[in-house]
Image (cartoon, grey):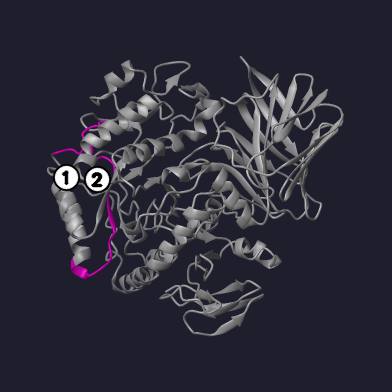
Amino acid sequence: MGLREISGGFDWRDGHQVVRVEAWGPDAVRVRVGLTGVRDDVPGALVGRPDAEVDVKVGQASAVLVNGKLRVELGEGLLRFVREDTQTELLAEERIHFWWPGSRLFTSTGNGYHRVAQNFRAYDGERLFGLGQHQHGLLDQKGAVVELVQRNAEVTIPFLVSSRGYGLLWNTPAVGRVELGRTGTRWVSDSARQIDYWLTAGDPADVLRNYADATGHAPEFPEWAAGFWQSKLRYRSQEELLAVAREYRDRGLPLSVIVVDFFHWTHLGEWRFDPAEWPDPAAAVRELDGMGVKLMVSVWPSVSPLSENYPVMLERGLFIATEQGPPVHADWPDKGVEGEVGVSFYDASDPEARAFVWDRVKRNYYDHGVRVWWLDACEPELKPGAPENLLTHDGPGLEVLNAYPVNNARAFFEGMRAEGETEIITLNRSAWAGSQRYGAALWSGDIPATFESLGAQIRAGLNVALSGIPWWTTDIGGFHGGDQASPEYRELIVRWFQYGALCPLFRLHGFRDPDVPLHPTMTGGPNEVWSYGDEAYEHITAAMRLRERLRPYVLEQMRVATETGLPPMRPLFVDFPHDEAAWAVDDQFLFGPDLLVAPVYRHGERSREAHLPAGARWTDHATGEVHEGGRTVLADAPLHRIPLFVRDGAQPF
């Protein structure tokens, strides 16, 4: 065994195992554990090493590092993390067994790779948030086992925020899981070369600020993106899409973005408009620009063997490779063939592959005037899901695949920057730690069109906010299904619009009835705001007008998010950490500091309870009634409005 001081930290060795602890920004440390040494060439989310003032003391068998609010102690081979000013234990490593193994487990999978596990102590009453976006319907995930793998609507961002006053990033894109049990918290990577995690201390707002400093801040949010985004599955032609935009204009309805969804292309992976359906996309962009509307185009990372790009990409090794078999990763319909073909995903971790894709996108979309990108199926959507068979530029699939959506967003961010663009936003179906620094907005994937799903999205969006992604949205009305004539569904879409108007991005999308098979000629049922009857239209357009009044406030909160890392939509406890009751509220949120939102997500509900945090006075936006904080009130919620409360006389509208 041996201990030595290093710059800003210390190393401890026990046999072949090396533990390195380093100050990594204010109130934060990075911990790496390897066999024979610590590596700097393993993919992760941290960018640079923020400065910190640190005090390190190393003895014969123990060490202490103090960095602002955080104190790290090493004793008997275990690390303990303490709040320096109160000497309260935040988190501690704990042995899995009193003899062997210790708190860190390396099980060989061959060729220098291991299944690694890191075990921590569990605490009664601890609440755990973040971890990206999941459809389990939980905000507090204590007691859950969460897979660390990317799937449609299940987004892995391995960052936790604890009610005990810390945040922890499991700094590896490896496939695995985290077990948030009563007897311990355990992080597992199925195949990796070392353990790597980052921990910071503070109240939730401090944790989120430090996390943004460590993994990157979102760029400036485009002003136009704060408006309403119209989409459906799918507009089949240029004229059909333009007719919808003109109808919004003629009705005097606000519209900022309209979307060209999938199958607009000649072949999947040619990244260009089919001229039979889109004869003059540049003219379409010009007309939309004249209406103040941006055109967003769906760009998939998969390439059909029928694509003109397939042979050259195959020859140049630009696809994700496979350990066994040809580089085919999924099956998908394509034009010019019945049934499905085997498609390949480009290797987004390869700079040459990113440059190739952007070159085609620039030539076939950007040069026509398109500036907004929908990065669909970017998990990537493997069929079957077999990351263990993949090999990328950055390493084996099991070790690195969770970072695919970050690299995919990077291709578009860097391509746009190279063209001199400063307003950059992509809409992504998946994300990982650090996606925010590439202008990535996240939406919640292909979710059901039900009230239960709406309730799940409220919790999912708050966990995304606590995972460092400030730009988030859902498919208003859900994706799968929706009968436009159903009274229940009409109520659902009204309630979803009211919620959507208070999300960071305000966006309508969905595959409405009638359902049809997946095919290049498919289209969904009508999904414009006038598609759901006169009463629903009245309530939906009221939500749209509310959003328009809020746009200056929305943009101010987006500016704060860029500068500080504090997300615009967040749980009550972020602003009111000392209100114990606020930690248990999982179906309300704050939009910025001044607006409390209590969505309605149950069929037939016309009132709901709302907790008003202690430490402020709250005015009911509808009635003007003022309430002292620290109490729960029964708020009226007729179909035409969502309960909103304004803090301390602020004026967000």
Tag 2 secondary structure? loop
Closest to the observer, 45 or 180: 45
Q: Where is residue 581 in the image (x, y as percent from the top left)?
A: 68, 67
Q: Are marks 1 and 2 in contact (CB under 8 Å)?
A: yes
Which image quarter is the N terminus in? top right
The disc at residue 291 is none
In the picture, measured across the screen, residue 80 lies left or right of residue 226, that is right
Residue 153 appearing in the image: yes
In the picture, measured across the screen, residue 36 lies left or right of residue 15, that is left
Give the CA distance from mark 1 to mark 2.
9 Å
Closest to the observer, 293 or 530: 293
Residue under the point 53% across and 24% down: 388
Closest to the observer, 381 or 3: 3
Q: Is residue 266 magenta?
A: yes
- From the image, tell me which residue sits under label 1: 281
Total labels: the figure holds: 2
Residue 303 appearing in the image: no
Give above or below for 564 relative to 184: below
Residue under the point 68% across and 47% down: 27
Location of residue 531 (image quadrant): bottom left
Residue under the point 34% across and 50% down: 423
Q: Position of residue 255 (x, y in %)?
A: 27, 62
- From the image, tell me which residue sits under label 2: 370
Tag 1 secondary structure? helix
Instruction: Considering the whole magenta stretch, tell me its main secondary structure.
Output: loop
Boundaries of the magenta span: 250-275
Location of residue 376 (image quadrant): top left
Residue under the point 24% across and 45% down: 370
Closest to the observer, 275 or 645: 645
Q: Where is residue 148 in the image (x, y as percent from the top left)?
A: 57, 37
Graded by Cα atoms within 10 Å as few (under 14), some (14 to 19) or many (20 or more), the crowding at tag 1 reads many
Give the amino acid at mark 2: Val
